[in-house]
Image (cartoon, coloured by chain):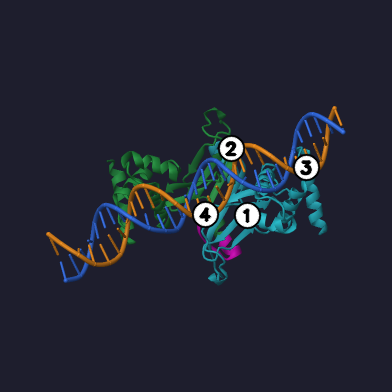
Chain colours: A green, B cyan, C orange, D blue
DNA sequence: ACAATAGATTATAATTATTATAAATAAAAT
DNA sequence: ATTTTATTTATAATAATTATAATCTATTGT
């Protein structure tokens, strides 16, 4: 197994232990799928299908419960792009909530911007509204200049 | 009926007509509910309940279809705060997509910021990523300094 | 080692939000 | 007045998610 993946797995294991949960075989398989697909934003169903390849007897509800658990512990981020399914993505090292999305309304492509552009605005929110920001979400809908709508897999149903 | 509401209704009527749709009694009742609750972010079910008070024989599917239609015509904005239900909000005059949300994770309160803070960032996205932004979404999760978790209606299930 | 307990999982059923279908209505066009 | 078209209603279907009960696993105390 990839050394960096095994390291990350270890860390997640410790995070679970700390909160009194164990890394069961099913949970490990699920986390592995997430680690191996860090770039994607998988739905619960997606995760289930992938996990089954390495753990065929796993149940769908277990995957749901595991994802929910990981979301609670802030290990994964649960997102919703308006197409009716929740999507899950590992919150990578330290940069807890520092990424934004570009969603192409023509081809449906989804890109992550792995920076935090909102620090200033968060200070402004705190100053002007007395609201302490702990997390945020920033998505841009639009079109790539170079979008060739050809490679459009699925109709992009996402709404703001 | 409130004069400004009737004006807005008129405008929406024209928008529908322009696209070849008619403002049926059911649609009018639905739009009225949205106008009268501009500050809220109602779910389809919420809208249905309110519409029934003035139009008891309306069907749920009609409300769904009407909301979908209004969303397509960009008259309402369809949103998703991660609690499993879509929410709808009138896009007020001209300021098409110029509002952001503060979501209190303690009391669940949801406030709108009716300004557009993202023009600069949108230019940056276009410059750096070749992506022409047509719409966006910006939500902040956090806590009000003055939050008295008491008036918390429903557990805030919203996730980023 | 062995029984008791608690935690986790499976299989399945239930729930919830939403969408599709077919029949009925209403409005508009000929 | 009759045909066409759009819309709505009532109902069924679907899809995502959550709850339930039974089973299994691991751990703890004896």
On whether residue A131 falls in the magenta region, the answer is yes
* Distance between the alpha carbons at the discs numbered 1 and 2: 27 Å
Using the image as rendered, state which of residue A123 and residue B6 is in the foreground: B6
Q: Secondary structure at mark 1?
A: helix
* Distance between the alpha carbons at the discs numbered 1 and 3: 23 Å
- The residue where tag 4 is placed is A136
- Can residue A9 be seen here? The reply is yes
Using the image as rendered, state which of residue A106 and residue A7 is in the foreground: A106
Can you say whether A157 is above or below C13 in the image?
above
Q: Residue at x 53, y 31 (%)?
A: A152
- The residue where tag 3 is placed is B22
Using the image as rendered, state which of residue A81 and residue A130 is in the foreground: A81
On whether residue B67 falls in the magenta region, the answer is no
| Chain letter for the residue marked with disc 1 in the picture | B
| Chain letter for the residue marked with disc 4 in the picture | A
- The residue where tag 2 is placed is A105
Single out the mark in the foreground, 1 or 4.
Answer: 1
Question: Which residues make up the magenta segment?
Answer: A125-136
Does B61 sit left or right of A1 as displayed? Answer: right
Q: Quadrant of residue A22?
A: bottom left
Same chain for mark 1 and mark 2? The answer is no
Neighbourhood count class around disc 1 (C-alpha, 10 Å): few under 14, some 14–19, many 20 upward: some
- The residue where tag 1 is placed is B45
Does A7 sit left or right of B157 as displayed? Answer: left
Neighbourhood count class around disc 2 (C-alpha, 10 Å): few under 14, some 14–19, many 20 upward: many
Can you say whether C5 is above or below A96 in the image?
below
Q: Residue at x 40, y 50 (%)?
A: A61
Q: Residue at x 42, y 57 (%)?
A: A72
* Distance between the alpha carbons at the discs numbered 4 and 2: 22 Å
């Amino acid at each position: 197994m990839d050394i960096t993946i095994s390291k990350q797995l270890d860390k997640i294991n410790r995070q679970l232990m700390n909160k009194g949960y164990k890394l069961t075989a099913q949970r490990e398989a699920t986390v592995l799928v997430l680690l191996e697909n860090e770039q994607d934003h998988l739905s619960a169903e997606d995760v289930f299908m992938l996990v089954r390849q390495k753990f065929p007897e796993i149940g769908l509800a277990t995957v749901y419960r595991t994802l929910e658990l990981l979301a609670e512990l802030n290990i994964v981020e649960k997102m919703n792009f308006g197409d009716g399914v929740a999507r899950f993505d590992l919150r990578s090292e330290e940069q807890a909530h520092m990424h934004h999305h570009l969603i192409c309304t023509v081809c449906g492509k989804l890109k992550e911007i792995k920076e935090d552009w909102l620090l200033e605005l968060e200070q402004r929110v705190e100053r002007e509204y007395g609201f302490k920001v702990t997390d945020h979400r920033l998505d841009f809908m639009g079109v790539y200049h170079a979008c060739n709508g050809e490679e459009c897999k699925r109709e992009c149903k996402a709404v703001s």
